[in-house]
């Protein structure tokens, strides 16, 4: 089976150091394809460099990407839908992006389907509304709308896995980093990749997940990167200090 191991990256948020560390780790784990689950930009200080990495992988046929709400805010008025700090970061990001980068973000799809998999930033249920998948009901709505065995998403910034029970309900499972989680095709799954660029579970390590399609296993990884450097870049760029503090503590 081609592309047996697929790495999923969500909520990179212009964090170049975290992205490079996760890409390196995924390649070491045998990843042959990369899926970017939205929010490539926002919050951090390297939007151009992150977009160049992703665009290059797509041009090589090694990756696909979808659009998140922060990506959308770069070309639509989202001021009323974002908190003030997030909006300030987006305004700064827009000032740094080239026309080519804006066009790239504008043309990203909200949702993609490949074989038995669905890729979406938030929920496959009304993807343009950016619903959070945080419990069994919201996971069920996403799975029902995707109509696929596997639904992969981000947006929540914390890793989680929902599985379909014998009565059809979606039940949350909290994965342990690095463990192989059997994810067989006999039931539906909703996997939340966590955030590469802004973890929020009191752990500064970056998040990504690896899906082994051939062996029907999913691995949730945490990766150490130079988050102090990334935090310093935020301050040097004149972005809000709170964004720097969040990276240092993983909040």
Image (tube, rainbow, N blue to C red):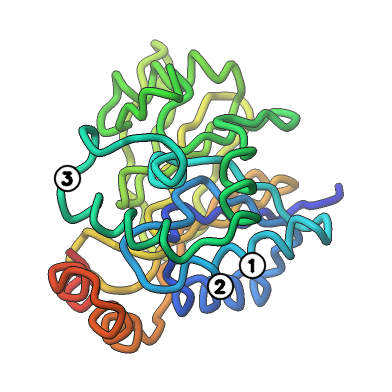
Dot 2: element: helix
Residue at 30% across / 51% down in the picture?
A: 158
Q: Residues within 10 Å of mark 3 (few under 14, many from 20)?
A: few
Q: Is residue 26 left or right of residue 181?
A: right
Residue shown at 76% from the left, 52% from the top = 4
For label 1, the residue is 52
Residue 83 is tagged as 3
Instruction: Give how far apart the Cα atoms at labels 1 and 3 are.
Output: 27 Å
Instruction: Give the distance between the C-alpha atoms of the residues marked 2 and 1, in whole angstroms.
Output: 5 Å
Residue 175 location in percent, x, y? 36, 52
Density class for disc 2 (Cα within 10 Å; few <14, some 14-19, many ≥20) is: some
Question: Where is mark 2, residue-wise?
Answer: 49
Q: Which x, y percent locates residue 47?
A: 47, 66
Q: Residues within 10 Å of mark 1 (few under 14, many from 20)?
A: few
Measure how far apart labels 3 and 2 are at the Cα level: 25 Å
Residue located 75% across and 29% down the image: 115
Contact between marks 2 and 1 (CB within 8 A): the answer is: yes
Q: Is residue 46 above or below residue 13?
A: below
Q: Where in the figure is residue 127, as x and y percent of width and height? A: 45, 24
Q: In percent of the image, x 46 and y 33: which residue is there? A: 190
Kind of element beneath mark 1:
helix
Q: Position of residue 31 (x, y in %)?
A: 70, 63
Quadrant in which the C terminus is drawn: bottom left
């Amino acid at each position: 089976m081609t592309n047996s191991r697929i790495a999923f990256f969500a909520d990179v948020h212009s964090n170049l150091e975290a992205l490079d560390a996760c890409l390196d780790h995924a390649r070491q784990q045998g990843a042959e394809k990369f899926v970017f689950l939205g929010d490539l930009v926002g919050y951090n200080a390297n939007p151009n460099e992150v977009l160049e990495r992703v665009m290059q992988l797509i041009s090589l046929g090694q990756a696909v990407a979808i659009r998140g709400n922060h990506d959308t805010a770069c070309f639509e008025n989202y001021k009323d839908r974002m908190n003030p700090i997030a909006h300030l970061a987006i305004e700064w990001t827009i000032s740094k992006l080239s026309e080519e980068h804006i066009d790239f973000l504008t043309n990203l799809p909200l949702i993609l389907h490949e074989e038995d998999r669905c890729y979406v930033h938030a929920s496959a249920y009304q993807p343009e509304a950016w619903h959070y998948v945080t419990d069994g009901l919201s996971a069920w709505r996403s799975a029902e709308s995707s109509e696929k065995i596997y639904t992969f998403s981000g947006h929540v910034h914390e890793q989680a896995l929902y599985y379909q029970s014998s009565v059809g309900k979606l039940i949350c499972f909290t994965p342990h980093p690095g463990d192989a989680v059997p994810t067989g095709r006999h039931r539906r799954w909703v996997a939340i990749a966590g955030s590469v660029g802004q973890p929020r579970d009191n752990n500064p390590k970056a998040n990504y997940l690896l899906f082994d399609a051939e062996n029907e296993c999913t691995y949730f990884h945490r990766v150490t990167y130079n988050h102090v450097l990334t935090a310093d870049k935020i301050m040097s760029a004149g972005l809000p200090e709170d964004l720097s503090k969040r990276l240092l503590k993983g909040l």
